[in-house]
Image (cartoon, rainbow, N blue to C red):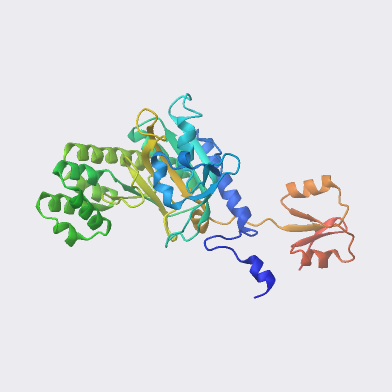
Amino acid sequence: MTDTDTKALLPAGLRDLLPPAAAFEASVVDRLVSHFAGFGFERVKPPLIEFEENLLAGTGAATAMQTFRVMDPMSQRMLGLRADITIQVARIATTRLKNAPRPLRLSYAGQILRVRGSQLHPERQFSQCGIELIGVDSPAADAEVVVTVASALAALGITGLSVDLNLPTLVPAVCDALHLTAEQRAEARTALDQKDAAAVAALGGPASDILGALLKACGSADTALDALRALDLPPVAAAERDRLAQVLDRVRADLPDVGLTVDAVENRGFEYHTGVAFSLFAKGAPGELGRGGRYLAGQEAGSTQEPAVGVTLFVDKVLDVAPQPEARPRLFVPAGTPLADRIRLRDEGWTVVAGLEPVEDALAEARRLDCDHAMVEGAPRAVG
């Protein structure tokens, strides 16, 4: 291995983004944020690193194992490199913007860094983009976030979109009503996460009956909802089911062409959510494009927390299915071409590459610089 090869090596899960991929990512992020802004979601920009105790407080505790930590030489306090931006936006909402009128609509985009990747998402540094609607607890707010982010993906030209809606609070509500012990709850959770019907049946008693029925309540939204409505659920669980139905009705009215599915017992990745949660998929995508749901924004339990619903898009996954823009033709212009002429050519649709020194053969120089055309005798000529 040469010295150059050694210098090009990067730690596992990290990569350089080269042309034209870097420009494509920036363009997609800009279009997403612009779409969000058009529906009242104002952009915020939290820092890449902040005090550990702030970053990991409240719902941020879920990212503790994924957070890089460093010592701040100035304050002599521990800092954390963000592993998720949602937590920071919630902090901003409940501190810097605590007196702003509710509902508060915020958007964000930026890089995050994690200690380790996952099997489906091995990258450790990647771009997030999303929205948060804070201060309102209603089906209308849940639906607005789903509709806004799905319509943003559709505006990028992504087709075959589907939304899988979940109720991570449903199983705990049933377990509470059945007075299951901590050990029984753990067994039930493991069986449901693994979609193991035999293990659910082995729980015995009323738990096996109702949790087994919930396990089957998945698939298309209408089929799953009919199955849920047929169950005699405890009052709290029934209220969760009814709220899901209201969200589905609103989303379907605004997005009739987006596929809607329901998994009543899915919980993994939604552990800190307090209501309806969801994942976004698209035809041809290797995994989910993003996920979101209802949670409590704020760093401490009690009066400093408020209801919120949001969604995070994994931009690298969005790029896998977003149509690539048509490349602008590259035009080589000779050294000394006035700026006004270069601006005019750019506005006409060219990517203008200016020579820095006079050359004898403009076509050969254009070919060397990977240009399609060269300005020869005052007119663009194809390199051929």
Horizontal side of residue 37 vs 231, given as left or right: right
- Give the x, y percent position of residue 375: 83, 58
**The one of 335 and 181 positioned closer to us in this rendering:** 181
Q: Measuring 20% from the left and 39% from the top, which residue is drawn there?
A: 238
Q: Residue furthest bottom?
A: 1
Horizontal side of residue 333 vs 129, given as left or right: right
Q: Residue furthest front?
A: 76
- Say how many tags the image has: 0
Horizontal side of residue 9 vs 97, given as left or right: right
**The one of 96 and 237 positioned closer to us in this rendering:** 96
Q: Quadrant of the C terminus?
A: bottom right
**The image quarter in which residue 30 lies:** top right
- Give the x, y percent position of residue 41: 50, 35
Can the viewer see residue 161 in this picture? no
**The image quarter in which residue 245 lies:** top left
- Give the x, y percent position of residue 38: 53, 36
Can the viewer see residue 74 in this picture? yes
Q: Quadrant of the N terminus?
A: bottom right
Horizontal side of residue 153 vs 234, given as left or right: right
- Give the x, y percent position of residue 126: 53, 53
